[in-house]
Image (spheres, rainbow, N blue to C red):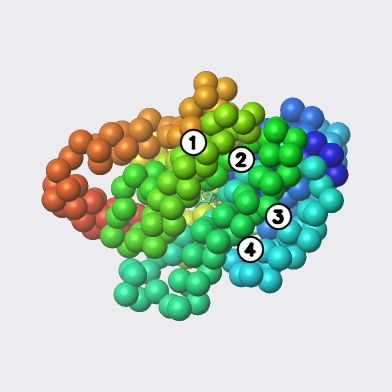
Amino acid sequence: MKNAVLITGATSGLGLAYAKEYAKEGCNLIITGRREEKIKANAIDIEHTYHVEVKVVIVDLANQEGLIYLLDEIKDDEIEVLVNNAGFGLKSVFSETTREEMDRILFLQINAVVILTRYILEKMLVRNRGTVINISSDGAFAVMPRNVLYSSTKLFILNFTEGLYMELEKSDIKVQVVCPGFIDSDFHASAGMNIIKKKNGFMKFSPPEEIVRLAMNDMKKGKVVSAPVIDAKIVRLMVHLLPRKLFYKIAIDFTKKRNKKLHR
Ligand SMILES: NC(=O)c1ccc[n+]([C@@H]2O[C@H](COP(=O)([O-])OP(=O)(O)OC[C@H]3O[C@@H](n4cnc5c(N)ncnc54)[C@H](OP(=O)(O)O)[C@@H]3O)[C@@H](O)[C@H]2O)c1
Protein backbone atom coordinates (compact mmCIF):
# COMPACT_ATOMS: atom_id res chain seq x y z
CA MET A 1 0.00 0.00 0.00
CA LYS A 2 1.26 3.50 -0.89
CA ASN A 3 0.82 6.67 1.18
CA ALA A 4 -0.27 4.64 4.19
CA VAL A 5 -0.91 5.68 7.76
CA LEU A 6 -0.45 2.82 10.22
CA ILE A 7 -2.49 3.22 13.41
CA THR A 8 -2.29 0.60 16.12
CA GLY A 9 -5.51 0.19 18.10
CA ALA A 10 -8.05 1.81 15.81
CA THR A 11 -11.04 -0.25 16.94
CA SER A 12 -12.30 2.60 19.10
CA GLY A 13 -11.40 5.87 20.81
CA LEU A 14 -8.34 7.87 19.86
CA GLY A 15 -7.05 5.41 17.24
CA LEU A 16 -10.37 5.47 15.39
CA ALA A 17 -10.43 9.28 15.55
CA TYR A 18 -6.90 9.41 14.07
CA ALA A 19 -7.99 6.98 11.35
CA LYS A 20 -10.91 9.20 10.32
CA GLU A 21 -8.79 12.36 10.44
CA TYR A 22 -6.11 10.92 8.15
CA ALA A 23 -8.72 9.36 5.84
CA LYS A 24 -10.30 12.80 5.54
CA GLU A 25 -6.92 14.02 4.24
CA GLY A 26 -6.97 11.25 1.59
CA CYS A 27 -4.45 8.88 3.19
CA ASN A 28 -4.76 5.12 2.92
CA LEU A 29 -4.88 3.32 6.25
CA ILE A 30 -3.54 0.23 7.93
CA ILE A 31 -5.41 -0.25 11.19
CA THR A 32 -4.91 -2.86 13.88
CA GLY A 33 -6.94 -4.24 16.74
CA ARG A 34 -8.30 -7.47 18.23
CA ARG A 35 -12.06 -6.88 18.11
CA GLU A 36 -12.50 -8.16 14.59
CA GLU A 37 -16.13 -7.35 13.90
CA LYS A 38 -15.86 -3.81 15.22
CA ILE A 39 -12.64 -2.86 13.42
CA LYS A 40 -13.81 -4.36 10.12
CA ALA A 41 -17.03 -2.34 10.38
CA ASN A 42 -14.89 0.79 10.98
CA ALA A 43 -12.85 -0.02 7.88
CA ILE A 44 -15.94 -0.37 5.66
CA ASP A 45 -17.40 2.85 7.04
CA ILE A 46 -14.14 4.79 6.43
CA GLU A 47 -13.70 3.39 2.91
CA HIS A 48 -17.24 4.39 1.96
CA THR A 49 -17.09 7.82 3.57
CA TYR A 50 -13.61 8.96 2.52
CA HIS A 51 -12.88 6.81 -0.57
CA VAL A 52 -9.50 5.59 0.67
CA GLU A 53 -8.05 2.10 0.96
CA VAL A 54 -8.13 0.52 4.43
CA LYS A 55 -6.21 -2.61 5.37
CA VAL A 56 -7.16 -4.28 8.66
CA VAL A 57 -4.71 -6.37 10.65
CA ILE A 58 -6.34 -8.37 13.43
CA VAL A 59 -3.59 -8.79 15.95
CA ASP A 60 -2.82 -8.87 19.67
CA LEU A 61 0.25 -6.64 20.02
CA ALA A 62 0.88 -7.43 23.66
CA ASN A 63 3.15 -10.33 22.76
CA GLN A 64 6.09 -11.08 20.51
CA GLU A 65 4.17 -13.37 18.07
CA GLY A 66 1.56 -10.70 17.39
CA LEU A 67 4.17 -8.05 16.74
CA ILE A 68 6.14 -10.30 14.37
CA TYR A 69 2.91 -11.05 12.52
CA LEU A 70 2.23 -7.30 12.08
CA LEU A 71 5.79 -6.60 10.86
CA ASP A 72 5.33 -9.29 8.21
CA GLU A 73 1.92 -7.91 7.19
CA ILE A 74 3.37 -4.43 6.55
CA LYS A 75 6.69 -5.39 4.99
CA ASP A 76 5.72 -4.19 1.48
CA ASP A 77 3.77 -1.10 2.53
CA GLU A 78 5.03 2.47 2.23
CA ILE A 79 4.15 3.94 5.60
CA GLU A 80 4.17 7.74 5.74
CA VAL A 81 2.74 8.06 9.25
CA LEU A 82 2.96 5.71 12.21
CA VAL A 83 0.62 6.27 15.15
CA ASN A 84 1.62 4.08 18.09
CA ASN A 85 -1.70 4.27 19.88
CA ALA A 86 -2.74 0.82 21.14
CA GLY A 87 -2.79 0.76 24.91
CA PHE A 88 -4.72 -0.36 27.95
CA GLY A 89 -4.90 0.35 31.65
CA LEU A 90 -4.89 -1.83 34.73
CA LYS A 91 -7.14 -1.29 37.71
CA SER A 92 -5.13 -3.21 40.31
CA VAL A 93 -2.48 -1.82 42.64
CA PHE A 94 1.03 -2.87 41.63
CA SER A 95 1.41 -5.51 44.35
CA GLU A 96 -1.69 -7.29 43.05
CA THR A 97 -0.75 -7.17 39.38
CA THR A 98 -0.34 -10.61 37.85
CA ARG A 99 2.75 -11.67 35.94
CA GLU A 100 0.66 -11.94 32.78
CA GLU A 101 -0.71 -8.39 33.18
CA MET A 102 2.81 -7.06 33.73
CA ASP A 103 4.21 -8.85 30.68
CA ARG A 104 1.36 -7.70 28.47
CA ILE A 105 1.35 -4.01 29.43
CA LEU A 106 5.14 -3.74 29.23
CA PHE A 107 5.23 -5.48 25.85
CA LEU A 108 2.42 -3.44 24.28
CA GLN A 109 3.38 -0.06 25.67
CA ILE A 110 7.17 -0.36 25.49
CA ASN A 111 8.48 -3.24 23.32
CA ALA A 112 5.89 -2.97 20.55
CA VAL A 113 6.28 0.83 20.35
CA VAL A 114 10.08 0.62 20.15
CA ILE A 115 10.28 -2.29 17.69
CA LEU A 116 7.57 -0.98 15.37
CA THR A 117 9.10 2.50 15.37
CA ARG A 118 12.58 1.16 14.63
CA TYR A 119 11.25 -1.02 11.77
CA ILE A 120 9.30 1.77 10.08
CA LEU A 121 11.82 4.53 10.79
CA GLU A 122 14.48 2.69 8.81
CA LYS A 123 12.33 3.00 5.67
CA MET A 124 11.36 6.61 6.48
CA LEU A 125 15.02 7.52 6.76
CA VAL A 126 15.71 6.17 3.25
CA ARG A 127 12.98 8.48 1.90
CA ASN A 128 13.85 11.22 4.43
CA ARG A 129 10.14 11.67 4.98
CA GLY A 130 7.54 10.54 7.50
CA THR A 131 5.81 11.16 10.80
CA VAL A 132 5.85 9.21 14.04
CA ILE A 133 3.15 9.96 16.61
CA ASN A 134 3.34 8.16 19.94
CA ILE A 135 0.40 8.21 22.33
CA SER A 136 1.43 8.73 25.91
CA SER A 137 -0.75 10.20 28.67
CA ASP A 138 -0.79 12.96 31.28
CA GLY A 139 0.08 10.01 33.52
CA ALA A 140 3.59 10.41 32.11
CA PHE A 141 3.82 13.77 33.91
CA ALA A 142 2.23 12.58 37.13
CA VAL A 143 2.38 9.03 38.39
CA MET A 144 -0.52 8.19 40.71
CA PRO A 145 -1.22 5.36 43.11
CA ARG A 146 -3.19 2.55 41.36
CA ASN A 147 -1.68 3.65 38.05
CA VAL A 148 1.98 2.85 38.61
CA LEU A 149 2.81 0.49 35.75
CA TYR A 150 0.62 2.27 33.22
CA SER A 151 2.14 5.68 34.05
CA SER A 152 5.64 4.27 33.91
CA THR A 153 5.14 2.88 30.40
CA LYS A 154 3.74 6.26 29.34
CA LEU A 155 6.76 8.04 30.82
CA PHE A 156 8.95 5.71 28.77
CA ILE A 157 7.02 6.71 25.63
CA LEU A 158 7.45 10.41 26.44
CA ASN A 159 11.18 10.07 27.03
CA PHE A 160 11.65 7.79 24.00
CA THR A 161 9.88 10.23 21.67
CA GLU A 162 11.74 13.31 22.88
CA GLY A 163 15.04 11.48 22.43
CA LEU A 164 13.99 10.40 18.97
CA TYR A 165 13.09 13.98 18.08
CA MET A 166 16.59 15.14 18.97
CA GLU A 167 18.25 12.36 16.98
CA LEU A 168 16.08 13.12 13.95
CA GLU A 169 16.26 16.90 14.24
CA LYS A 170 18.27 17.28 11.03
CA SER A 171 15.95 15.02 9.00
CA ASP A 172 12.51 15.74 7.53
CA ILE A 173 10.90 13.14 9.78
CA LYS A 174 8.42 14.62 12.24
CA VAL A 175 8.03 13.20 15.72
CA GLN A 176 5.35 13.94 18.31
CA VAL A 177 4.26 12.52 21.63
CA VAL A 178 0.65 13.14 22.68
CA CYS A 179 -0.18 13.27 26.40
CA PRO A 180 -3.95 13.58 26.83
CA GLY A 181 -5.97 13.69 30.02
CA PHE A 182 -9.13 11.57 30.30
CA ILE A 183 -10.65 10.49 26.97
CA ASP A 184 -14.22 9.37 26.45
CA SER A 185 -13.42 6.00 24.87
CA ASP A 186 -13.61 2.25 25.60
CA PHE A 187 -10.42 2.47 27.70
CA HIS A 188 -11.92 2.40 31.21
CA ALA A 189 -14.62 -0.17 30.44
CA SER A 190 -12.01 -2.46 28.83
CA ALA A 191 -9.98 -2.29 32.05
CA GLY A 192 -13.04 -3.19 34.10
CA MET A 193 -13.17 0.29 35.65
CA ASN A 194 -16.78 1.13 36.38
CA ILE A 195 -16.61 4.91 36.30
CA ILE A 196 -18.80 7.95 35.87
CA LYS A 197 -17.41 10.12 33.07
CA LYS A 198 -17.35 13.83 33.94
CA LYS A 199 -18.37 15.93 30.93
CA ASN A 200 -17.23 19.34 32.24
CA GLY A 201 -14.66 21.03 34.46
CA PHE A 202 -11.18 19.93 35.53
CA MET A 203 -10.37 16.30 34.61
CA LYS A 204 -13.33 15.99 32.28
CA PHE A 205 -13.48 13.23 29.66
CA SER A 206 -12.75 14.74 26.25
CA PRO A 207 -14.08 13.35 22.97
CA PRO A 208 -11.24 11.57 21.08
CA GLU A 209 -11.89 13.72 17.99
CA GLU A 210 -11.09 16.85 20.03
CA ILE A 211 -7.80 15.37 21.25
CA VAL A 212 -6.79 14.49 17.68
CA ARG A 213 -7.70 17.95 16.38
CA LEU A 214 -5.69 19.70 19.12
CA ALA A 215 -2.72 17.35 18.75
CA MET A 216 -2.68 17.86 14.97
CA ASN A 217 -2.70 21.63 15.53
CA ASP A 218 0.22 21.24 17.91
CA MET A 219 2.01 19.23 15.23
CA LYS A 220 1.55 22.07 12.73
CA LYS A 221 3.09 24.43 15.30
CA GLY A 222 6.04 22.05 15.65
CA LYS A 223 5.25 21.02 19.24
CA VAL A 224 7.06 17.79 20.09
CA VAL A 225 5.16 17.20 23.34
CA SER A 226 1.45 17.80 22.91
CA ALA A 227 -0.57 18.08 26.10
CA PRO A 228 -3.72 18.69 24.08
CA VAL A 229 -6.19 19.65 26.80
CA ILE A 230 -5.83 22.33 29.46
CA ASP A 231 -6.08 19.71 32.24
CA ALA A 232 -2.98 17.91 30.98
CA LYS A 233 -1.12 21.23 30.74
CA ILE A 234 -2.06 22.07 34.35
CA VAL A 235 -0.97 18.64 35.60
CA ARG A 236 2.34 19.00 33.77
CA LEU A 237 3.00 22.45 35.23
CA MET A 238 1.87 21.57 38.76
CA VAL A 239 4.06 18.49 38.93
CA HIS A 240 7.01 20.52 37.70
CA LEU A 241 6.53 23.25 40.30
CA LEU A 242 5.48 21.32 43.40
CA PRO A 243 7.96 19.97 45.95
CA ARG A 244 7.87 16.15 45.55
CA LYS A 245 6.51 15.41 49.04
CA LEU A 246 3.62 17.81 48.45
CA PHE A 247 2.94 16.19 45.08
CA TYR A 248 2.83 12.71 46.70
CA LYS A 249 0.30 13.96 49.25
CA ILE A 250 -1.93 15.56 46.60
CA ALA A 251 -1.70 12.45 44.37
CA ILE A 252 -2.61 10.10 47.23
CA ASP A 253 -5.56 12.30 48.34
CA PHE A 254 -6.76 12.75 44.77
CA THR A 255 -6.72 8.99 44.14
CA LYS A 256 -8.62 8.27 47.37
CA LYS A 257 -11.31 10.85 46.51
CA ARG A 258 -11.53 9.76 42.88
CA ASN A 259 -11.94 6.12 43.81
CA LYS A 260 -14.73 6.98 46.22
CA LYS A 261 -16.47 9.20 43.65
CA LEU A 262 -15.91 7.31 40.42
CA HIS A 263 -16.39 3.71 41.46
CA ARG A 264 -20.04 3.02 42.00
N1 LIG B 1 -8.83 6.93 27.80
C1 LIG B 1 -8.06 7.76 28.47
O1 LIG B 1 -8.49 8.38 29.44
C2 LIG B 1 -6.62 7.95 28.04
C3 LIG B 1 -5.89 9.00 28.60
C4 LIG B 1 -4.58 9.20 28.20
C5 LIG B 1 -4.01 8.38 27.25
N2 LIG B 1 -4.74 7.36 26.71
C6 LIG B 1 -4.08 6.49 25.72
O2 LIG B 1 -4.75 6.65 24.47
C7 LIG B 1 -4.56 5.46 23.69
C8 LIG B 1 -5.89 5.04 23.11
O3 LIG B 1 -6.77 4.71 24.15
P1 LIG B 1 -8.33 5.05 24.09
O4 LIG B 1 -8.62 5.96 25.21
O5 LIG B 1 -8.71 5.43 22.74
O6 LIG B 1 -8.93 3.63 24.52
P2 LIG B 1 -9.70 2.48 23.69
O7 LIG B 1 -10.94 3.02 23.09
O8 LIG B 1 -9.80 1.34 24.62
O9 LIG B 1 -8.68 2.13 22.51
C9 LIG B 1 -7.54 1.37 22.73
C10 LIG B 1 -7.15 0.71 21.42
O10 LIG B 1 -6.00 -0.11 21.67
C11 LIG B 1 -6.26 -1.41 21.19
N3 LIG B 1 -5.58 -2.41 22.01
C12 LIG B 1 -5.66 -2.56 23.35
N4 LIG B 1 -4.94 -3.63 23.73
C13 LIG B 1 -4.41 -4.16 22.60
C14 LIG B 1 -3.59 -5.27 22.33
N5 LIG B 1 -3.17 -6.10 23.28
N6 LIG B 1 -3.23 -5.52 21.03
C15 LIG B 1 -3.68 -4.72 20.06
N7 LIG B 1 -4.46 -3.65 20.25
C16 LIG B 1 -4.82 -3.37 21.51
C17 LIG B 1 -7.77 -1.58 21.25
O11 LIG B 1 -8.23 -2.48 20.26
P3 LIG B 1 -8.81 -3.94 20.57
O12 LIG B 1 -9.50 -3.90 21.88
O13 LIG B 1 -9.69 -4.23 19.41
O14 LIG B 1 -7.58 -4.81 20.57
C18 LIG B 1 -8.25 -0.18 20.89
O15 LIG B 1 -8.34 -0.05 19.50
C19 LIG B 1 -3.92 4.43 24.61
O16 LIG B 1 -2.55 4.36 24.36
C20 LIG B 1 -4.17 5.00 26.01
O17 LIG B 1 -3.18 4.60 26.91
C21 LIG B 1 -6.03 7.12 27.08
Which residue is denoted by mark 4 in the rendering? 61
Q: Amino acid at mark 1?
A: Met
Q: Is 118 placed left or right of 1 in the picture?
A: left
Describe the element under mark 2 as helix, strand or loop: strand
Q: CA distance from mark 4 to mark 3?
A: 9 Å
Within 10 Å of disc 4 (Cα), the crowding (few <14, some 14-19, many 20+) is many
Between the C-alphas of marks 3 and 2, the distance is: 16 Å
Residue at horizontal 73 percent and vertical 60 percent from the top: 70
Please state the horizontal and vertical placement of residue 97, each as a whole percent of the image. Answer: 39, 74
Q: Residue at x 46, y 71 (%)?
A: 102
Residue 132, labelled with which disc?
2
Distance from Cα at disc 4 to Cα at disc 1: 27 Å
Secondary structure of residue under mark 4? loop
| CB atoms of marks 1 and 2 within 8 Å | no
Q: Nearer the viewer, mark 1 or mark 2?
A: 1
Q: Crowding near pointer 1: few (<14 within 10 Å), some, many (20+)? A: few
Horizontally, residue 85 falls left or right of residue 141, namely right
Q: Residue 169 in the image: x percent, y percent? A: 54, 31
Circle 2 crowding by C-alpha within 10 Å: few under 14, some 14–19, many from 20 = many
Indicate the quadrant containing the C terminus: top left, top right, bottom left or bottom right: bottom left
Say which amino acid is labelled 3.
Answer: Thr
Q: Marks 3 and 4: in contact by CB < 8 Å?
A: yes
Q: Which residue is mark 3?
A: 32
Asked if labels 1 and 4 touch by Cβ distance under 8 angstroms, the answer is: no
Q: Horizontal placement of 33 versus 230: left or right? A: right
